[in-house]
Image (cartoon, rainbow, N blue to C red):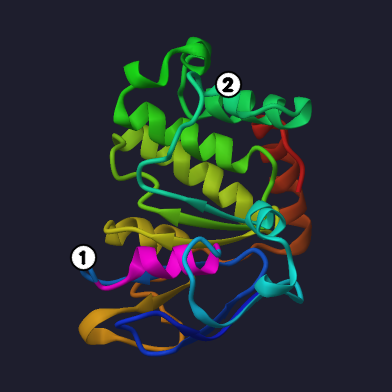
Amino acid sequence: MLKVDRLAIAGLPPLSFDVAAGDCIAIEGPSGSGKTRILRAIADLDAAGGYVSLEGAERTELPAPVWRQRVRYVSAEPAWWADTARAHVTRAPDRHRFERMAGSLGLAPGLLDAPIARLSTGERLRLGLARALADEPRLILLDEPTGALDATATALTEELIRFQLLARRAVILVSHDRAQIDRLAQRSLLLGAAMATAAQPAGADVTRAPAAATADERVATLARRWGTQP
């Protein structure tokens, strides 16, 4: 699905790795090691040399809006440009998925129409994730998706991420939560003193892809809950 070849970011050696459909790879390293810069470069939000392709299409071959619809960066503090969360999602199918996902993330319906400025950091974070996934991007770049959430909201968020993987989307995760990485990621890209230019096995065993029939059943069940289809 995603192929990164000699991605050139200042202060880092050239990075090469790939992520298959249905896989989650984590990027680990201390603060300032370049984790967010890697996500932003893959999303084509910051200039970076090298080759990045998704399902055979290279990022320079597609208009920026098309690439960013397929490759979605979800920041640790999502940006907002309208007064309410609902106003950010305009297409009817996307709005339906957005509403369903927001509810399943533990958010009351009234929060979708509340002024963004009155929402808590955790509410904005969950609404930002639901907004980012509403139009079903193929690759999801998550930057500390549960950093401001309590244990219950974190569990609901991780369930949504698992559904994206079961639906054959790919995820790149940045998280300071080692246990979360072990729960979600199959591999890790290590930065800093433990720098590796290829993805290495994560530090703990994780749930692997189930048999095809079981996976299809789980996707169907979760699809009904999240109001979306793979």
| Label 2 packing within 10 angstroms: few (<14), some (14-19), many (20+) | some
> Which of the two discs, 1 and 2, labels the residue nearer the N terminus?
1
Q: Is residue 69 left or right of residue 34?
A: right
Find numbered disc 2 in the image and state the secondary structure of the residue it sits on. Answer: helix
Q: Is residue 31 left or right of residue 48?
A: left
Q: Is residue 88 visible?
A: yes
Find numbered disc 1 in the image and state the secondary structure of the residue it sits on. Answer: loop
Seen at 66% across and 71% down, the residue is 59
Circle 1 residue: 31
| Label 1 packing within 10 angstroms: few (<14), some (14-19), many (20+) | few
Residue 74 percent location from the top left of the image: 47, 49
Seen at 67% across and 51% down, the residue is 69
Amino acid under label 1?
Answer: Ser
Q: Nearer the viewer, residue 157 or 109?
A: 109
Q: Is residue 176 above or below residue 109?
A: below
Q: Is residue 213 above or below residue 88?
A: below
Q: Reply yes or no: does residue 37 show up in magenta.
A: yes
Seen at 39% across and 75% down, the residue is 202
Q: Main secondary structure of the magenta part?
A: helix
Span colored in magenta: 33-43
The answer to which image quadrant residue 115 occupies is: top left
The answer to which image quadrant residue 152 occupies is: top left
Seen at 47% across and 65% down, the residue is 46
Q: Is residue 185 visible?
A: no
Q: Is residue 180 above or below residue 61?
A: above
Amino acid under label 2?
Answer: Arg
Q: Is residue 22 left or right of residue 47?
A: right
Task: Give the label on residue 86, or none.
Answer: 2
Residue 141 percent location from the top left of the image: 50, 58
Is the C-beta separation of discs 1 and 2 under 8 Å?
A: no
